[in-house]
Image: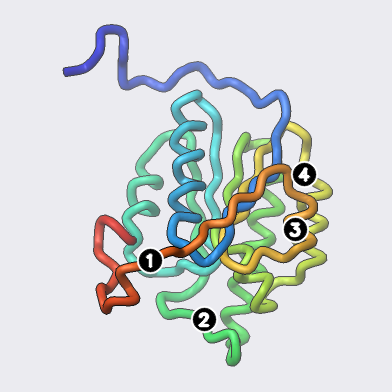
Amino acid sequence: MVEEGLEHSLPAPESLPRGLVQIFTGDGKGKTSAALGVVLRALGHGLKVCVIFFMKGDYPYGERRILSELPNVTVVSFGSKGFVNPEDVKPEQREAAERALAAAREAVLGGNYDLVVLDEVNVAVAWRLVELDEVMRLLKDKPPQVELILTGRRADRKLVEMADLVTEMLKIKHPYDKGVKARKGIDY
């Protein structure tokens, strides 16, 4: 039953009085999920959102599919289907991450979005797919009204220091440790 007065139209766009920098990091599950929760909340208030996936290429992630169908959200994905080996980074993987960072810069500075999510950018920095200094420069150049979320394990301490909110997901227990593979519709 739908509550009276609730409709499926978007509210009038609002703007953020002050955009912050948030980081979701750590070895626990839920970093992207937390960021996408903020995305849903923002969309519910008519904000314009851009989600940039740094290391999630052609894999059939459910969140990417549904987000691309929603109004007021732009989804851009870089990378390949396979995983990046930090000990053997391929030139095309580095180039994809650099393109993702350029897209991030355009999204953050272009004036078209209220919220920008850089999914797995922390890993891209840790594995030297993109330069830490470039990500730090993006945070410094961010307009005051844009909210920016960085996700991924191994957030660099310099980024943590620059952020307004940092949440570390701590793994206590994970089904993967018992051989349970990622499940479609729940984990991707």
- Contact between marks 1 and 2 (CB within 8 A): the answer is no
Q: Residue furthest front?
A: 172
Q: Secondary structure at mark 2?
A: loop
Closer to the eye: label 3 or 1: 1
Q: CA distance from mark 4 to mark 2?
A: 28 Å
Image x and y of residue 18, in percent: 73, 29
Nearest to N terminus: mark 4 or mark 2? 2
Residue labelled with disc 2: 84
Q: Residue at x 44, y 55 (%)?
A: 30
Residue labelled with disc 1: 173
Amino acid under label 2? Answer: Val
At label 1, counting other C-alpha atoms closer than 10 Å, the crowd grade (few under 14, some 14-19, many 20 or more) is few
Q: Secondary structure at mark 4?
A: loop
Nearest to N terminus: mark 2 or mark 3? 2
Q: CA distance from mark 2 to mark 3?
A: 22 Å
Q: Which mark is residue 159?
A: 3
Q: CA distance from mark 3 to mark 1?
A: 27 Å
Image x and y of residue 38, in percent: 50, 39
Q: CA distance from mark 4 to mark 1?
A: 36 Å
Nearest to N terminus: mark 3 or mark 1? 3
